[in-house]
Amino acid sequence: MIYLNLFITFFKIGLFGFGGGYGMLSLIQHETVERAHWLSTAEFTDIVAISQMTPGPIGINSATYCGYTAIHNAGHGQLMSVLGSATATFALVLPSLILMILISRMFMKYMNTRPVRSVFAGLRPAVVGLLAAATLLLCNAENFSTPAMNPWQFWISVALFAATAFGTGYLKINPIRMICYAAFAGLLLLY
Amino acid sequence: MKSEVNIYWDLFRTFFKIGIFTLGGGYAMIPLIEEEVVNRHRWVSKEEMLDLIAIAQSCPGVFAINIAIFIGYKLHKTQGAIATAFGTALPSFLIILAIAIFFAAFKDNPVIAAIFRGIRPAVVALIAVPTFRMAQSAKIGWTNCWIPIVSAIAIWLLGVSPIYIILIAGLGGYLYGMYIKPTES
């Protein structure tokens, strides 16, 4: 049953995942964390981190990882979890396969018409909102701790957030390098 | 028959290589895809490639997978598309699986836990930064900034599914562009 749920969920994510990997994260998070409770926010954040540091598209990486973790958290063994990651990845790719083939076969000529352009014009600003929502939802106690619970960890976390935003946004430091710096800071300051 | 198999193998191998050698997500893949598909194999022309990128970007789904499917389908119909999609996804799948199995055993280790306490806030920032970059490329200004703000608040505070936001935004864009202020085509 969980496999069917996993399939339907990632098929939906593949079908409505506009705006590339990052836009998709908002959907993955809503579906797997908020709705299905397959993973915690902290686990989701770890998955995003690992997806970013490893080769390949972030969408595929995180679907594979989410599928594995969802089944693993449900108390199943390793082989079942591998099957979970295969289900999620396949379900994520399937809508693309159907849509791209349909477009190649019949709708290529409609891609530049007014109705289609209008729809995309409406989607673009909304995808920005999706990305903002993903950020806001991840700004919680699981990722940052709280001033009451652990003030030291909270302020270190805020500093790491600010440093990473500044480093990648203004200084154009490579995000993977930035994650490595943060990992080192975590080991040094939050052990 | 042999050459037929060789063509699928070629498609698979090329996109496997593209999948394994790109770090940092879909857009980082564009130069590598161009190098392999346009310059080396000459499967599509440079102009066609630009069109494909534009369509793959606006469609839902994983960008690199969309491009792979387009090119695979163009060359060898559905079987070609399956070969390229499979090739692009397989390296990710195998690498992540190896890490997931390894990480499940080590995530309670205090050293690993401390490292991830440092990484998590950084990752949130890595998602925050492209929000602003995307706002620029989507030409968000004073007149349309309410759209991302309302969408974000609906998802964040009211728990509305992003799928509804996508559906409403698409419908809204259609009605606006068709009946209120015509979108240039």
Image (spheres, coloured by chain):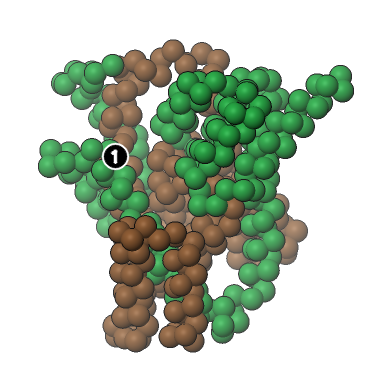
Asked whether, in this view, residue A154 is left or right of residue B116, the answer is: left
- Please state the horizontal and vertical placement of residue B176, each as a whole percent of the image: 20, 25
**Along the line of sight, the residue nearer the viewer: A21 or A145:** A21
- Residue depicted at 13% across the width and 38% down the height: B143
**Along the line of sight, the residue nearer the viewer: B9 or B166:** B9
- Residue closest to the far left: B142
Asked whether, in this view, residue B11 is left or right of residue A28, the answer is: right
For disc 1, the neighbor class at 10 Å (few under 14, some 14 to 19, many from 20) is few
- Residue depicted at 58% across the width and 27% down the height: B38
Chain A tint as drawn: brown
Chain drawn in green: B
**Along the line of sight, the residue nearer the viewer: A177 or B105:** A177
- Please state the horizontal and vertical placement of residue B164, each as a whole percent of the image: 35, 40
- Residue depicted at 66% across the width and 33% down the height: B84
- Please state the horizontal and vertical placement of residue B45, each as a whole percent of the image: 54, 20
- Number of residue marks: 1
- Please state the horizontal and vertical placement of residue A83, each as a whole percent of the image: 70, 52
- Residue depicted at 46% across the width and 46% down the height: A21
Task: Kindly identify which chain the residue marked by label 1 belongs to.
Answer: B
Circle 1 sits in a helix, a strand or a loop, which is it?
helix
Asked whether, in this view, residue A70 is left or right of residue B105, the answer is: left
